Amino acid sequence: MTPTGTAGANFIDPKVLARIDNLELVARTVVSGFINGLHHSPYIGLSVDFAEHRAYMPGDDIRRIDWRLFARTDRFFVKEFEADTNSNFYVLLDVSRSMDFKTGDLSKLDYARYLAASLAYFSNQQRDRVGLYTFDNDLVDVVPCSARHLRQILFSLDNAKAKGPGELAAPLNKIVSSISRRSVIAIISDFYEDPATIVEAVNMLKYRGNDVIVFHILDPEELNLTIDEAASFEDLETGERIPVVPDEFRAEYKGLVQSHIDRLRKSFVEHGIDYSLFETSTPLDYALFRYLSERERLSRVS
């Protein structure tokens, strides 16, 4: 399928991803898809922070020449960004019980695992060091940051299960104390907590000078509540069951969900944290293409 505004780019339906058993193949396929979507972008790295200048070399993209510096020195220099250096990139993946929810082919955890694998694979291809933390209300699995740990990360993601109750503050507090070098950190979760609590927990990482990216994963049914029949809904975190008549509750429900999303987005943006909402029905390579395109655009503006 080809989403609007990306003519010539073919993206992968989540139903296709759901049939691929090999996580590395998924990551390679997804990364190939969103890189093709970006076409000949001069810069598609995850980190957009300027690092340093270096002398222009034959073959370098002339669009990265610093023309202001040329005017002062009469010499050609190109801008390098953090993604051009060997950065540390961490994926923090929520594996709490609520991530097991699905109404389509992929659960939120399946989609999140594919996203985590794709980001790790992409960063590894850029020669960055990659690491992984999975968590619920505590740390579940840790793969230290290294240029050689991609396969270990993919193995850990392949075996990730949604089991325990969720809470951000406790595991993120442990992660903050274990990351000593400034890093790019991607947090993948459905963020089922009070927005103020979520932002406070995530800010612990931002305050240490890290570049923090938040990927909010939701099933379309969680956004729209399209079910017509009265039913009993189970809280996957607590097991509590609540009888609901969707027709009577739908408008209020959608308003509450949208308010939660808006509060998260506004608070994260105010604190300089990237926020992106991904629906599990959206082709993953297109979602990444859209996100990285916007990140690249903002890097040019700044």
Image (tube, helix red, strand yellow):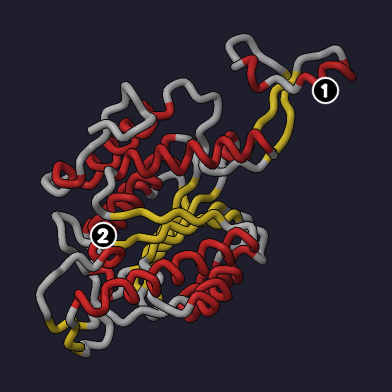
Among the two numbered marks 2 and 1 on one chain, the one whose residue lies closer to the N terminus: 1
Visible residue check, residue 174: no
Residue 91 left/right relative to 111: right
Visible residue check, residue 66: yes
Residue 31 left/right relative to 273: left
Can you tell which of label 2 and label 1 is closer to the viewer?
Answer: 2
Residue 246 left/right relative to 287: left
Residue occupying the point 38% across, 65% down: 189
Residue 268 left/right relative to 209: left
Q: How many residues crowd around disc 1 within 10 Å: few (fewer than 14), some, or many (20 or more)?
A: some
Query: SS class of the residue under badge 1?
Result: helix
Q: Which image quarter holds the C terminus?
A: top right
Residue annotated with mark 2: 220
Rendering coords of residue 240 (x, y %): 22, 90
Residue occupying the point 50% across, 25% down: 41
Residue occupying the point 60% across, 16% down: 60
Q: Are marks 2 and 1 in contact (CB under 8 Å)?
A: no
Residue annotated with mark 1: 69
Tell me which amino acid carries mark 1.
Answer: Leu
Rendering coords of residue 43 (x, y %): 55, 29
Can you tell which quarter of the image residue 256 is in? bottom left
Rendered position, 80 above or below 166: above
Q: How many residues crowd around disc 2 within 10 Å: few (fewer than 14), some, or many (20 or more)?
A: some
Rendering coords of residue 272 (x, y %): 63, 57
Depth check, front residue: 291 or 150: 291
Depth check, front residue: 169 or 1: 1
Depth check, front residue: 49 or 196: 196
Q: Which image quarter holds the N terminus?
A: top left
Q: For marks 2 and 1, give the CA distance.
A: 49 Å
Rendered position, 20 above or below 274: above
